[in-house]
Image (cartoon, grey):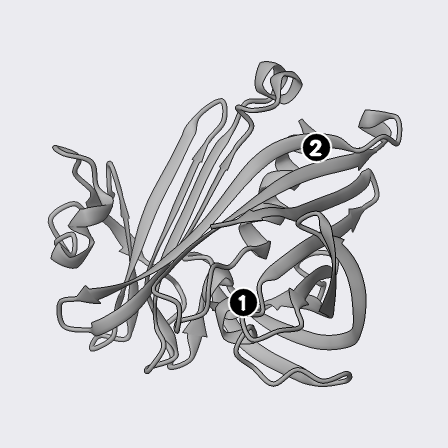
């Protein structure tokens, strides 16, 4: 169960899809764990699919939708003991450099599902669920109806305790922005990031340029380090996360790594469509 929870957490923090200049792209990864619960051997635990596409959003114009889907289904041991499904989506406005919406879906022993919408005029982040506490106080955004199944309804739950500010990103769009930043050893960037509930201050460092194996071949890549502190707290929000971006025009995410006291979690690119 500890492996399961930490892998879900790592996946939620790490992923991003393609740059805004790409209309559609799908990336495939394999997530694995090695540590005390696998006798030190690398154990595949999940298949990951990342995708992006451009779309027209009423009132916002052309935006980029980023999506991540994670499943333990291909791996019988994990599927038997700790089955899980994760979907994470966000809508990012490159010209405004902030998010417009994000969705979090997690199915384990129970289902957690929440959709967040940024009301730029009110400078608030609205949270919606299947059964909201504030049903009727705010209508579910028409622009996000595409995220609902036929007949599915979401109700207003409450406002996020943090006010909206220009430049506010989520985890996916933060990495989206990093893929388009100038990269050189020693460079540092800072971002305000939300998960719909909490607010974090992220610091991203460009550590070095090196060669790694990804997608079945050797690739030159930039190694980035991500650290975060939650607003109102002093301790780090999580252990340092490392991401390797391809040293080319596309800056494809090749490898993600997090070391935990109980083991090492790795997500490696396997295929690009």
Q: Let me know if residue 134 appears in the view.
A: no
Residue under circle 1? Answer: 175
Q: CA distance from mark 1 to mark 2?
A: 24 Å
Identify the residue shown where x is 41% and y is 68%. 162
Residue under circle 2? Answer: 3
Query: Do callouts 1 and 2 mark residues in contact (Cβ within 8 Å)?
Result: no
- Placement of 267 over or under 178, stated as above or below: above
Residue 39: quadrant of the picture? top right
Residue 218: quadrant of the picture? bottom right
For this rendering, which residue is in front, 195 or 250? 250
Identify the residue shown where x is 72% and y is 61%. 242
Identify the residue shown where x is 59% and y is 55%. 14
> With 118 as the anchor, is 58 left or right in this view?
left
Residue 57 horizontal/vertical position (percent): 18, 66
Query: SS at mark 1?
Result: helix
Residue 167 horizontal/vertical position (percent): 42, 80
> With 140 as the anchor, is 50 left or right in this view?
right
Q: Let me know if residue 109 appears in the view.
A: yes
Residue 40 horizontal/vertical position (percent): 88, 31
Residue 90: quadrant of the picture? bottom left
- Placement of 172 over or under 38, stated as above or below: below
Q: Which of the two discs, 1 and 2, labels the residue nearer the N terminus?
A: 2
Residue 65 horizontal/vertical position (percent): 34, 60
Tell me the mark number nearer the camera, choosing from 1 and 2: 1
Q: Residues within 10 Å of mark 1 (few under 14, many from 20)?
A: many
For this rendering, which residue is in front, 94 or 109? 94
For this rendering, which residue is in front, 46 or 101? 46
- Placement of 127 over or under 48, stated as above or below: below
Q: Residue furthest front?
A: 217
Identify the residue shown where x is 38% and y is 75%. 98
Position of the N terminus, as image quadrant, is: top right
């Amino acid at each position: 169960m500890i492996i399961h929870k930490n892998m879900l957490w790592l996946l939620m923090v790490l992923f991003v899809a393609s740059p805004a200049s790409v209309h559609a792209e799908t990336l495939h990864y394999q997530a694995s764990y090695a540590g005390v619960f696998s006798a030190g051997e690398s154990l595949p635990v999940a298949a990951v699919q990342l995708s992006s596409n451009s779309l027209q959003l009423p009132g916002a114009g052309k935006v980029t939708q980023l999506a991540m889907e994670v499943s333990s289904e291909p791996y019988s041991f994990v599927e038997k003991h700790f089955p899980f499904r994760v979907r994470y989506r966000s809508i990012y406005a490159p010209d405004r450099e902030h998010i417009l919406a994000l969705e979090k879906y997690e199915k384990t022993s129970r289902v957690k599902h929440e959709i967040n919408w940024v009301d730029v005029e009110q400078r608030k982040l609205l949270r919606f669920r299947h059964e909201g506490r504030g049903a009727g106080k705010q209508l579910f955004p028409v622009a996000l109806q595409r995220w609902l199944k036929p007949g599915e309804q979401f109700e207003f739950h409450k406002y996020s305790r943090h006010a909206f500010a220009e430049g506010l990103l989520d985890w996916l769009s933060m990495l989206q922005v990093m893929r388009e930043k100038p990269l050189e050893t020693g460079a540092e960037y800072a971002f305000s990031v939300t998960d719909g509930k909490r607010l974090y201050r992220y610091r991203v460092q460009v550590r070095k340029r090196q060669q790694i194996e990804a997608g079945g071949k050797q690739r030159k890549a930039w190694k980035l380090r991500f650290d975060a502190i939650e607003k109102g707290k002093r301790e780090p929000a999580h252990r340092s996360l490392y991401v390797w971006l391809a040293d080319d025009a596309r800056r494809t995410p090749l490898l993600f790594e997090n070391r935990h006291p109980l083991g090492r979690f790795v997500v490696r690119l396997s295929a690009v469509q």
